[in-house]
Amino acid sequence: MSFFTRSGSASQPVNISRRSFLTAAGMTAIALPILAACGSPAGGTSSFSAPDVKPPTEFAGRTNVVIWSPWSGNNHEVFTGVLDGFNRSQTDIYAEVQQFNGYDGVTEKIAAGLQARQIPDIGVFSDVSWNKFFLNDTLEPLDGYFDKNFGRGAFNERLFDEGVVRGESFWLPFGRSTPLFYYNKEIFAAAGLPDRAPATWDEFRSWGKQITGQNYNGNSLKMRAYTGADDWYMQGLVWNFGGAISEGLDVTVDSAAAIAAAEFDRAVVNDDKSGYLAQDVNNDFMNGQVATITNSTGSLTGLIKGSPFEVGAGFLPQQKTHGVPTGGAGLGIMKNASPERKDAAAQVLAYLSGEEASSTWTVGTGYLPSTIAAANSTKVRQVMADNPSYKLAVDQLELARQPDPVRRYVQSTIIEMRTAIQKLYTENADPAATLKATATKLRADTESVRKVYESKVA
């Protein structure tokens, strides 16, 4: 076990400017006008082609199903392994995973594919991207594909309902998550801190002042690595302080409560010097440069495998109230795929919803067990018994809720929120002025979708 003392360091966390972070994260690409690109062009379903697929010889001659996925690393390996199980379980369909750069990469590619009239059969959509494709009639209603073994009753009801609009399902939970608080147990123990996550954000800030500047394996520690792309986390923090990004489509991100949340993060980074904007929070955490991070449930397995120390995990800290957003991914079938491809895609979804596939995915990644069969499986129960951290997200789900509607349905919300939090971190920007500017932009953009939202959703 490595302990630390207050001293200098051989390695410092890298502080990234907002300009360099925007470039590295490809933030300009995220501004692609998805709503404009998603409209169903004239010409009918049959005019949409599928991406090229080159099946291995053993799977040649089948109906091909193309899945566009955001996952890399460990999660990609698990996902492709599960799909290989599907391919070997029958002789009619070959499912191929084509990987893109995160949720934004998939969203951009599908939007461009709709314009180019070449689309996958299944898209892995984030919890805040599928809604926009729904508004533009490019997602297939799924209820007609359900049977007694595949449908509402197979899923965690809480998660399933997030993909339902006016009684019709368009998005099935797979890879669902909540954020967890991760910490380095060696660092906490050496600092004399309890072996748990902070109960409140005030406690987190106090602990951060104890840890920041200490030496750990040659690194001068910070308390937390932030990512300027994490508007998901900011959604929860705004709730923590009693605010919201919106009430329905009415933007409230410039309320006093939301400003208090923004001020908290600004102060941690710029006054306490306990936090910093990182290029890759998981890598910095596993390399011992930072004591804590907040990240998806789906990072759990990778962090445990990749860290040379024992990883602790806990619920998100509270403030005035709970602030836990659900997140992660789900699966949707593209409406403009051919009927044959859509039927085949539905069989893939049915397989992924079965006990073996869904439990293997949960255990291999740390994502929530989205199906009842997975939650009750011996495989999932055993891993939760062996490491209670895997049960945390399931327990925390009782406190969680969907992100606010503006974040789900208004295209510019994610980029505007990311721009705001990067200004707080790297420019020490005034929270009130920053969020006022964000709210002004979002109120204007909200009006462009209000009519279709009210006709289809509200």
Image: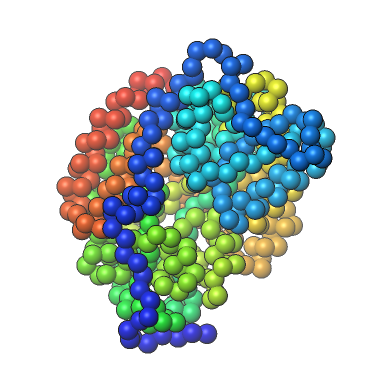
- Which residue lies most toward the top here? 43
Residue 449 is situated, as x and y percent measured from the top left of the image, at: 35, 25
Instruction: Give left or right: position of 95 versus 76.
Output: right
Q: Is residue 30 visible?
A: yes
What is the number of callouts on the image? 0
Image point (56%, 13%), residue name: 44
Residue 166 is situated, as x and y percent measured from the top left of the image, at: 51, 25
- Closer-to-camera residue (136/106): 106
- Seen in the picture, residue 119 relative to 298 is either above or below; the reply is above
Residue 386 sits in quarter: bottom right
Residue 74 sits in quarter: bottom right
Instruction: Give left or right: position of 205 versus 403.
Output: left
- Seen in the picture, residue 270 relative to 83 is either above or below; the reply is below
Residue 297 is situated, as x and y percent measured from the top left of the image, at: 53, 56
Residue 445 is situated, as x and y percent measured from the top left of the image, at: 29, 30
Residue 279 sits in quarter: bottom left
Image point (45%, 42%), residue name: 104
Instruction: Give left or right: position of 139 versus 319.
Output: right
Q: Is residue 315 visible?
A: no
Instruction: Give left or right: position of 448 versus 40.
Output: left
- Closer-to-camera residue (397/77): 77
- Seen in the picture, residue 430 relative to 303 is either above or below; the reply is above
Specify the color scheme. Answer: rainbow
Image point (70%, 22%), residue name: 340
Assign the C terminus to one quadrant of the image.
Answer: top left
Image point (67%, 47%), residue name: 80
